Image (cartoon, helix red, strand yellow):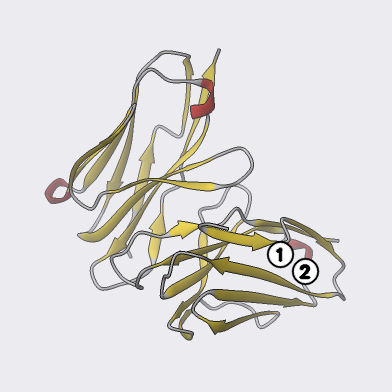
Amino acid sequence: GIQVEQSPPDLILQEGANSTLRCNFSDSVNNLQWFHQNPWGQLINLFYIPSGTKQNGRLSATTVATERYSLLYISSSQTTDSGVYFCAVEMDSNYQLIWGAGTKLIIKP
Amino acid sequence: ETGVTQTPRHLVMGMTNKKSLKCEQHLGHNAMYWYKQSAKKPLELMFVYSLEERVENNSVPSRFSPECPNSSHLFLHLHTLQPEDSALYLCASSQGVSGYEQYFGPGTRLTVT
């Protein structure tokens, strides 16, 4: 089945720093989402981005479907950005989201 | 209420109890999902419903029984659970079952004693 790998697994940064999170996937997809899971467990949608580039405030994401990877950029990090970031993909014509193991981000004040 | 809501938020139950988790979506979506998130494991899809019909059951033990009475409500009935079933149970919804963005509820943190 499709494999989803996220890197790095853990990331510790000072407030104000920028970061890049990566998601590699092993097959073509028709759905790719980035989520932020806060310390209380809530999964918050960041981007629906099977291809192309999107921006939302300090966050942006790029998916290069032909090369099977997606990047999530966080600029000017804040302590509230702490949590686990997940990438999830859906193969063509298969409605199951396959999840990566996540990147645990800690932003220190 | 907006988005996807789940009740209860926390549940402690013994192995012989019967309880139910409730999920409601206010987004007008046609598909709903149950996921299980255990510590240090990726999210596991349990059940998928499209227009109140179950379309996926990922080899989930029969002690978990889903119910979807309409496109806005989803239940997960629990009975004779095991301690290893302790986890965060997440409900999600989407406009359709394939190629659509999924939106998640806050989850129910279940502890089986």
Q: Horizontal and vertical percent for residue B88? A: 65, 56
Disc 1 packing (10 Å; few <14; some 14–19; many ≥20): some
User: Is A70 left or right of B44, judged from the image as shown?
Assistant: left
Chain letter of disc 1? B
- Residue position marked by numbered label 2 in the rendering: B82
Q: Secondary structure at mark 2?
A: loop
Indicate the amino acid at tag 1.
Asp
Q: Horizontal and vertical percent for residue B43? A: 51, 57
Q: Secondary structure at mark 1?
A: helix
- Residue position marked by numbered label 1 in the rendering: B85
Where the N terminus of chain B falls, by quadrant?
A: bottom right
In front: A14, or A60? Answer: A60
Q: Is residue A7 above or below residue B22?
A: above
Q: Residue at x 57, y 75 (%)?
A: B73
Q: Residue at x 78, y 63 (%)?
A: B83
Q: Horizontal and vertical percent for residue B96? A: 34, 72
Which mark identifies residue A97? none
